[in-house]
Image: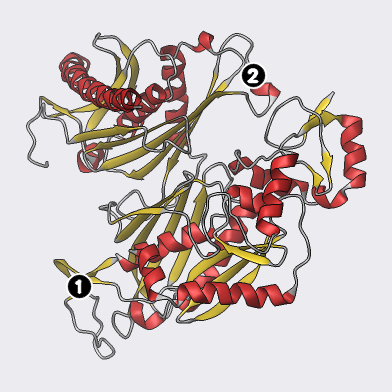
Amino acid sequence: MAKVLGYEYGKKEVMRTKYGVVSGLWVCAESQYKKIREKFPSSFDQSGHNEEVLKGTRRMLLSATERSYLYESLHSKHIIRPDGRNIKQFRPIQSHTGFLELSNGSSKITLSDGSECIVSIKAKVVDKAQEQDLVSVDLEIAGHREDSPYTLSLTSTLQSLYAKHIPRESLNLTSKFAYKLYIDILVIATYSHPLTMMSLATYLALQSTFLPKLTSSVDDKEIEEQPTFHDYEFVKLQVTVPVIFTVAVIGENCIIDPSAEEMEVSDNGLIVSWFDGKPISPMGTVRLSETNIKSLNPALIVKSVDLVSSIANSPWNVQIILS
Amino acid sequence: MDGRRWNELRRFQCRINTHPNSADGSSFVEQGNSKVVCIVEGPMEPPSRSQLSATEATLNISLNVTPFSSIDRKRRNKNERRIQEIITSLKRTFEQSIITDKYPRTTISITCHVLTLDGGLISAVTNSITLALIDAGIAMYDYISSVSAGFYDNTPLLDLNQLEENDLSYLTIGIVGKSEKLALLILENKIPLDKLEGVLAIAVAGGHRIRDMMDKEVRRHGELRLSKLANK
């Protein structure tokens, strides 16, 4: 009786390499599966989580030789990335904004590997005294359940990021009322780690958000007054928005925006959030690959923050990415 | 309501092969202000044996009405009864129109994302699925084109928007190609029996118009592909 370990369904032997069990080939006999599991427990812990991650990523699979070739070329002093980028370079990004008429702001981002994400911003007038957070993030990833740990952890990362760093003043209406922003993120397809894509799309959507213009008075402390709005004039939302970068660590090297293949061979992953010219929380490690996760040299965290800052602080780069 | 004549369709625009890298077949349909993205994957080996049929393909349809699609933001449960009912009827429709016995032991998974919704949910979704299936190269007997039609004050009305849909009784039909055969008929409230014929008649005529527009897009895309091949 064959046991399916993951998503890919093919009848091949499980191979063992110096990097661990090759994840492309997931079907093996029950007895063999147990043996491998005993031998490489680290590859199988949180197996439920692994399958979750694998579901959305069907093309990540590398053979043993491809894997070792790629690892060597990314590990060496002169990094050669499979698509010829340098360590600071993003993949080409295609974006559209303002295509959803029923939302206050919207954006769509497509990466070169076919990953795609749509963000909608909707605003609602709320009583400031009753609402704690003026930003609410809702995430949906095609192929994942809404209550899956994968989706939930990404949602909480983004929620904490935006709730903390989007200033309340920029959403202020009157002394009583404020706008509450509902950020809905829909990931149609993803092959690499989706955080960068989602945060860039949200950045774009927030930068192209238009809110109805207030016509009633700003000060309603004395008189009970419901805010009223202009019928067709809008005001552009002025906010500074944090952005999250994903960095893959391989040996002593850090590379930005890893593709699915690079994620597969990476030793570890880092997310670095950037806001107002400095790194902020959440910053931490992420699982980019299922098998060979290695511990992280703290010096590399500093190195990757430097890498991100060289990108984020260069206005030229940011414009390229975000225009 | 929006200044159209009774037999006029809303602006209909469609694109196929919108996600060439991430799916086998994909389409984007705009019907008035409703926007639907459809993604088809397959025919592929099913994730679990239990879903496998030895003689024909199994269809997996999921319909995602996004919380930001309506004017007021509203979270919808995936298992909401209305959504489940729509999925069931879509499944029945497309099981009939896809030549399923050509693809034994496989599944075809169809995902629809409704980005904005302004009436005509079922018709926009049906049209987008048809186009995405064509783009995926899955054998079908003919186009299924779909349109809604309502009835108000002794006049039948074609292709209702959300406001009209809220107040009128209406039906949605799916027509097979250029014939007058119906693959899908959904009537969620009541229409007088003697008036039904007139409503169906304009719906069929509207469906044929939509079929022509979808066909035009498919041919345009086909020519584009062909010219690319020829240039190589």
Of residues B202 and B43, the one drawn nearer to the viewer in this rendering: B43
The quarter of the image holding the C terminus of chain A is bottom left
Which residue is at a point 68% across and 40% down the rendered structure image?
Answer: A62
Which structural element holds mark 2? Answer: loop
- The amino acid pointed to by label 1 is Lys
In the image, residue A5 sits, relative to residue B104, either above or below, namely below
Q: Are marks 2 and 1 in contact (CB under 8 Å)?
A: no
Q: Position of residue A30 (x, y in %)?
A: 87, 30
Residue A287 visible somewhere in the drawing: no
Of residues B19 and A61, the one drawn nearer to the viewer in this rendering: A61
Label 2 – label 1 distance at C-alpha: 56 Å
| Residue identifier under label 2 | B52
Which residue is at a point 84% across and 48% down the rendered structure image?
Answer: A18
Image-based side of B205 in relation to A256, left or right:
left
Mark 2 neighbour class, 10 Å CA radius: few under 14, some 14 to 19, many 20 or more: some
Residue A124 visible somewhere in the drawing: yes
Of residues A173 and A304, the one drawn nearer to the viewer in this rendering: A304
Would you identify the image quadrant in which residue B25 lies? top left
Which residue is at a point 20% across and 39% down the rendered structure image?
Answer: B164
Residue A26 is marked as none
Of residues A179 and A301, the one drawn nearer to the viewer in this rendering: A301
Same subunit, tags 2 and 1: no
In the image, residue B131 sits, relative to residue B167, either above or below, namely above
- The amino acid pointed to by label 2 is Leu
Which structural element holds mark 1? Answer: strand
